[in-house]
Amino acid sequence: MDKVSFRKKQIDLVSDFMKSDKAQKEINNLYFQLFNDLDFQNAPSVGITMSTNDEIPTFPIINQCFEMGKEVYIPKTFSDYSMSFVKYTQDTELVESAFGVREPRDYENNVMNPPDLLIVPGLAYSQDKNRLGFGSGSFDRYLAKFPTKTISLALTSQYYQAPLWPVYVLDKQIDKIIVAKDEQNADNQSAR
C-alpha cells in the first residue's frame, strides 16, 4: 500500500481509537514509561510538538519537563518544510501554522538546533524503528541536518511488527519507540 493510502487509513484508525475507553489508559501508560525512561530523565532539553486532536496530548509531558527543570523547545515550521526548535515557556505566544499546529509566534531568539532529545510524533511505527509521519517530511529533513536522540510514543493501534507502508532512504528511523502496554500489563505495572 502506498504511503498516502496507508496514512489516510491510519488517521481514521487512530481517530476511532482515541474515542475508545482504552485510549486514556494507554496514554497514561505511555506517560509512565516515558517519565521513567533514562534518556528522558537525563536530557537537559526536550523538543516536542504541541499536540493536535487525535494525538497523544503533549501538555502533560511539557509540564513534567518543567517540573524536572528541563528546557522545552517546540518546532517552528517554514514553507520549505524546514523547521527550527524555539524555547517554550508558559509565556510563549503561539499561532496556528498552515498544518494546524500551534507554534511560537516569535522564532528569531532562543533557538536550539537540536535539543538533547526529540519526542517525534507520527501516525505509525514498526518494530524495526521505522516511522510514518504526517506527510510533510519536516522531521526527516530536520533529523538529516541535526541528528539527535529521538523517542516516539506509540499507541497499540499505531505499532506494527513490520512497516505496512513503503520506507524510503530519506525516512529517518527513531532511536527508541515506547509502546503502550495492553490494559492488563498496564494495570499490573501501576500496581507495583
Image (cartoon, rainbow, N blue to C red):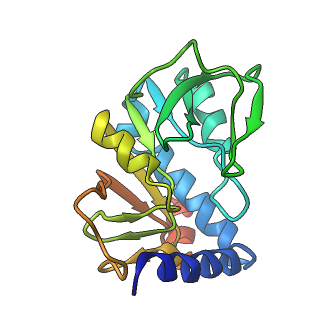
Question: In x, y percent, where is residue 172?
Answer: 30, 54
Q: Residue furthest front?
A: 80
**Looking at the image, residue 57 lies above or below residue 50:** below
Total labels: the figure holds 0
Q: Residue at x 46, y 25 (%)?
A: 45
Side of 24 relative to 47 (left or right): right
Q: Residue furthest top?
A: 109
Q: Residue at x 72, y 51 (%)?
A: 100
Say which of 157 and 23 sits in front: 157
Q: Quadrant of residue 112?
A: top left
Side of 116 relative to 25 (left or right): left
Say which of 43 and 111 sits in front: 111
Question: In x, y percent, where is residue 160?
Answer: 38, 78
Q: Residue furthest bottom?
A: 1
Q: Residue furthest left?
A: 169
From where the camera sits, is residue 38 visible?
A: no
Q: Residue at x 38, y 28 (%)?
A: 114
Q: Quadrant of residue 142?
A: top left
Q: Residue at x 43, y 47 (%)?
A: 139
Question: In x, y percent, where is residue 82?
Answer: 46, 38
From where the camera sits, is residue 29 visible?
A: yes
Question: In x, y percent, where is residue 116?
Answer: 37, 29
